[in-house]
Amino acid sequence: MKHRYKRRINTVKNLLVAFCGLDGSGKTTQLNLLADWLESNHEHIFKTRQPCDFYRQNDKVRAYLDDGIVTNMHGIALLAAADRQFHVSEVIEPNLQHGHVLCDRYLYSSIAFFKARGESVDYIKAINKDVPEPDLTVFIDISPEEALRRIALRDAGQKTLFEEQDTSVFVKVRDAFLENIPSSALIIDGTQSKTAIHNEITSEFEKRRSFV
Ligand SMILES: Nc1ncnc2c1ncn2[C@@H]1O[C@H](COP(=O)(O)OP(=O)(O)O)[C@@H](O)[C@H]1O
Ligand SMILES: [Mg+2]
């Protein structure tokens, strides 16, 4: 009798993982822990972050972030969207060919912050409409008070960003995150230990990769 072999299709895919949350929530900490874990398992990874220097170093963006001076918030949102377009096509997509891409902040941070700055979510979504949804979006949730406490500890002595001087901005940002992250996002209680959070992320990573 002829043996019938079931052909195994190679479904291994590199994942795009985005880390979102308030400043101080532990995004960079957890991105680095996941990167180390993947590298120790001999996986290829690429670490990146949004926004890039095109946005960060723009004079109008700096005037707003440092001192709250802005004449046209739509324009600032468009700069963020242009920055993300180049980041996706020139950095994220090429690097996904070679390994997992771990991105510190993503579109959802933009939606949350620009909503808190008075922009409509529909407008931000429209100017970012073709940005790919990550394979795994991690939202690390902490209270605005805890965010401000950690930022003050971390950045002791440095100049505080304009929006980081006021808890009410962080309340709006957190609410906007929770309303706009993808329904498939992994929402983690960020007050747990770094190790407990890391373990939740690795276990979800393993699940997501077996589904793609
Ligand atoms: N789970 C945690 N519990 C307590 N402190 C934490 C935790 N995760 C991160 N931190 C600390 O909080 C600060 C902000 O963390 P960081 O990773 O820089 O946050 P983000 O990148 O989201 O701004 C750092 O000093 C970091 O060591
Ligand atoms: Mg960070």
Image (cartoon, grey):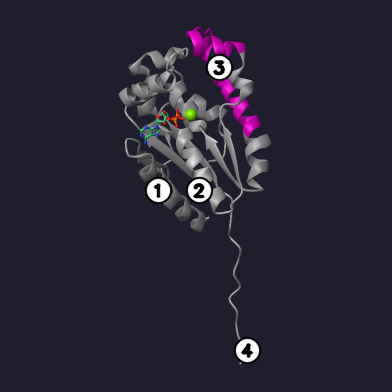
Q: Mark 3 highlights which residue?
A: 76
Whole-angstrom CA distance, mark 1 to mark 4, is 46 Å
> Tag 3: Cα neighbours inside 10 Å, few (<14), some, or many (≥20)?
some
Could you tell whether 6 is left or right of 163 in the image? right
Q: Mark 4 highlights which residue?
A: 2
The amino acid type found where label 2 is placed reads: Trp
User: Disc 3 vs disc 1: which is toward the camera?
Assistant: 1
Q: Mark 1 highlights which residue?
A: 199
Residue 107 picture location, percent across and down = 51, 32
Helix or strand or loop: what does disc 3 sit on? helix
Residue 153 in the image: above or below residue 67 = below
User: Disc 2 vs disc 4: which is toward the camera?
Assistant: 2
Indicate if the residue with disc 1 has its beta carbon within 8 Å of ligand 1: no
Helix or strand or loop: what does disc 1 sit on? helix
- Does residue 44 belong to the magenta stretch? no
The numbered dot on residue 136 is none
Helix or strand or loop: what does disc 4 sit on? loop
Q: Mark 2 highlights which residue?
A: 37
> Tag 1: Cα neighbours inside 10 Å, few (<14), some, or many (≥20)?
some
